[in-house]
Amino acid sequence: MSTETQDDGLEYNFAYLDEQTKRMIRRALLKAVAVPGYQVPFAGREMPMPYGWGTGGIQVTASILEPDDVLKVIDQGADDTTNAVSIRKFFQRVAGVATTEKTEGATLIQTRHRIPEMPLHEGQILVYQVPIPEPLRFLEPRETETRKMHALEEYGLMHVKLYEDIARHGHIATTYAYPVKVNDRYIMDPSPTPKFDNPKMNRCAALQLFGAGREKRIYAVPPYTDVVSLDFEDHPFEIQAWDNPCSLCGETNSFLDEVIMDDQGTRMFVCSDTDHCTTRQQQGYQGPGQEAAE
Amino acid sequence: MTETENLQTPLLSVQSVTKTYGPHLGCSDISFDLYPGEVVGIVGESGSGKTTLLNCLAGRLTPDAGKVLYTDRLGSALNVHTVSEPQRRMLMRTDWAFVHQHARDGLRMTVSAGGNVGERLMAGGARHYGNIREQALDWLEKTEVDVSRIDDRPDTFSGGMQQRLQIARNLVTGPRLVFMDEPTGGLDVSVQARLLDLLRGLVSEMGLSAIIVTHDLAVARLLSHRLVVMRRGQIVETGLTDQVLDDPQDAYTQLLVSSVLHP
Amino acid sequence: MYVAVKGGERAIDNAHRLLAEDRRGKTSTPDLTVDQIREQMKLAVDRVMTEGSVYDPDLAALALKQARGDMIEAIFLVRAYRTTLARFGSSLPVETGSMKIDRRISAAFKDVPGGQILGPTFDYTHRLIDFKLAADGGDPEEAISMDDAMPQARHVLDLLAGEGLVETPEASQDQAPPGDITRTPVEFPMDRSTRLQSLARGDEGFLLALGYSTQRGYARTHPFAGEIRVGRVAVEFQPEELGFPIQIGEMEMTECNMINQFQGSKTVPPQFTRGYGIALGHGERKAMAMALVDRSLRAGELGEERTAPSQDEEFVLSHCDNVQATGFVEHLKLPHYVDFQSELNLVRKMRRQVEDGIAFAGKEAAE
């Protein structure tokens, strides 16, 4: 066996994984698309990034990537976070595909924790990195039991959790990884995206694929599929809202990151979706922060 | 259910049920019927196989031989151990209820009292928080749990209160058949008396059909219409409760009865 | 003004350069060679091979060098490399019964056919730091070598199985071909072959602690080290077109057969049960711990009540893989700004509600 270092990405197959592995993952993806929200077990491989760094999403992306794809990678909504940079570089090296920071121009977007603010269009694919695919996991630790609960649609326990939230806090206190029901059948974990993003999943024009590498599960939401956030009739689902607009672009309807500016605790709020924010600024929108700086 | 029509059809028919654990006998060749509205007590000393039998009846254990037939709402007889798992689990959360000896086996200790009572409602599709809460309050009241404790977790409750909460959680959906495993076991005598009183009230008020396992003949006398006396895995005597306790035929039953003070 | 708090490409590149510098250490110290690691850090190399699931001492030694001696990191490197290897086929099961033995002991019998062979072991050393090694201790004294042809011996447990005193491996296994956890998704409950694979790749420390817990009373299995053997086994491959097996090489392996608690009844004559452990290279601690845990996980099959962590298949097998474990624990270092922001907003909102409530109640009281 060769122990030479392989610094040159060209020595690997296109997009790193061998074709047999890609085929295996594509089969799982097809099944996932056919049964929306159902978690399909797949024989996840060891990838050159650690588990927890997005190996599930990376394997899904690697299996469906084509040479003429345009790839966008975001983490926390931003293209320039360290892990997004690292994953984008990986695919540049092992697949040589074009990359972009523009949501609009991407054919494939791999994401961790956010859905872009701009509505996705037909033909685009959004690949989510998922740490714990099982929405029932923290209510029931056993895989054998949770699979049964899904099979039999025994979802009462999920509402018990929401009931507890309301009883204790007066409202549902789940802010991210907020459970949804897909196509009126399976309860699904949308990955740790903020619940702010849940409505974007519903009847989305793009194909949404979810990969959990460590737990070895793939699931999917096909285009234009119903995705409903769980709630009670008298306590309907609500998304987060901010008191202030984005300091940079003035957007009032986007997820904002809080940035602590100095030791006195001065804060500013800016769009977590960096592409959305810069696009708006280029279009001439300004936020209160920009005006103050001028 | 139209009681008059169904009086002839047993709700639960137990036919030659046998369960062994390796060389150890659990229960052997047990047969009896439970009719709608009836409470049957299974009595015997510890180790007599009562709990094994109860678990077989409730589908929690699979017997080695024999069968248990349950008559569902449509009047068809289901074999408890050969129906599909979805069907059995559906029964367990709708038609049936199981009250454990230790409340913590039957409660979610980290979920509030209201959540515990509401779970079966939500499992059945209830999606209105206000209504669920109202029913939970109603049942807490019925089972004499202080309604101001609705948002407290059961691990902050006394033993008797936990047991009453477990009963509320089980009865909230109006089950057709209730299994109880030593429901008063492990409680103080005064607490036992109150719980027994409550159970007796609910049983007659709701016309519950129930199978109660107990080693306590006083409990059996208060709650059950008929008795099944077990020893070493076998039935030694059955009959109406008063008849068995006041005029026991079997030598073992006589010993059992004479060893306790009459109420 | 708003400064980029999010990291960037340059930061990553520089971090990699710093890492490389740190790995090398002071350049006045000679660079460590892969050969040195392979020859003198053999037990580390062996563990990397076992838990990395690749038998390649050179590769494992290189991984250790690159990982700066961090075992799990080295195991991880080997696993990721393994992903890229094409698979030609599967070898035939290795015959550990025809192992060329370096070391073989049984704690159950004073003497066994084939003998007790101590071999290279720390067991009877005094754990005193040998300062001679620091001062370049020179070459060690030559040991009395056994015959060049290494001895072979039947498994000790086979001797007992002949009498029916211990279960045969066949009795506890179905005849289906063994699973492959690197190629098919695992599902619970697992068959024993798949379970053994997971354990063989599992973290030595985790299995050691679990095995230890069974000895301390969390599901006791009354183990006896029936046999531990270390040596070389032939690896045979049968190409489809050839129709007969050919030997493609040799591997060093460590195998442990535990003899455990007997079972039986009035009708079934009592028999000892067994637990099995195996590792690539020389890995006795791993093989023994694995055998203890394997036996413990057979609780269901053997009709024992499951009460302890070591008997809980989902608990043990879902958490024994150190590459998975380290990934998920360490991923907490990745940004979670968005989730935290969501929680932050919620807590603020809830605090406001509480404060408003208190203010309201105070006002009411005052009126």
Image (spheres, coloured by chain):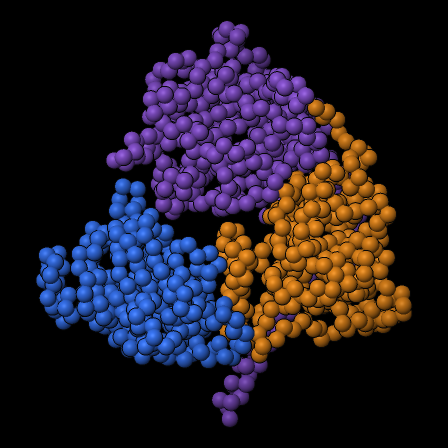
Chain colours: A orange, B blue, C purple
Q: Nearer the viewer, residue C333 or A181?
A: A181
Residue shown at the point (15%, 65%) measured from the top left: B244
Q: Nearer the viewer, residue A219 or A285?
A: A219
Depicted B142 relative to depicted C83: above or below: below
- Residue situated furthest bottom in the rendering: C367
**Which quadrant of the rendered structure holds the C terminus of chain B?**
bottom left
* C44 horizontally vs B251: left or right: right
- Residue situated furthest top in the rendering: C147
Residue shown at the point (46%, 80%) measured from the top left: B134
Depicted B91 relative to depicted A57: above or below: below
Instruction: Estimate the x, y position of residue C176 in percent, counting from the top left.
Output: 52, 34
Residue shown at the point (43%, 20%) measured from the top left: C155
Residue C218 picture quarter: top left
Q: From where the camera sits, is residue A120 visible? A: yes
Q: From where the camera sits, is residue C351 visible? A: no
Instruction: Estimate the x, y position of residue A1 in percent, counting from the top left.
Output: 70, 24
Depicted B104 relative to depicted C348: above or below: above
Residue shown at the point (40%, 61%) measured from the top left: B78
**Which quadrant of the rendered structure holds the N terminus of chain B?**
bottom left
* A228 horizontally vs B25: left or right: right
Instruction: Estimate the x, y position of residue B4 in percent, counting from the top left.
Output: 32, 77
Instruction: Estimate the x, y position of residue A175 in percent, counting from the top left.
Output: 62, 66
* B227 horizontally vs C264: left or right: left
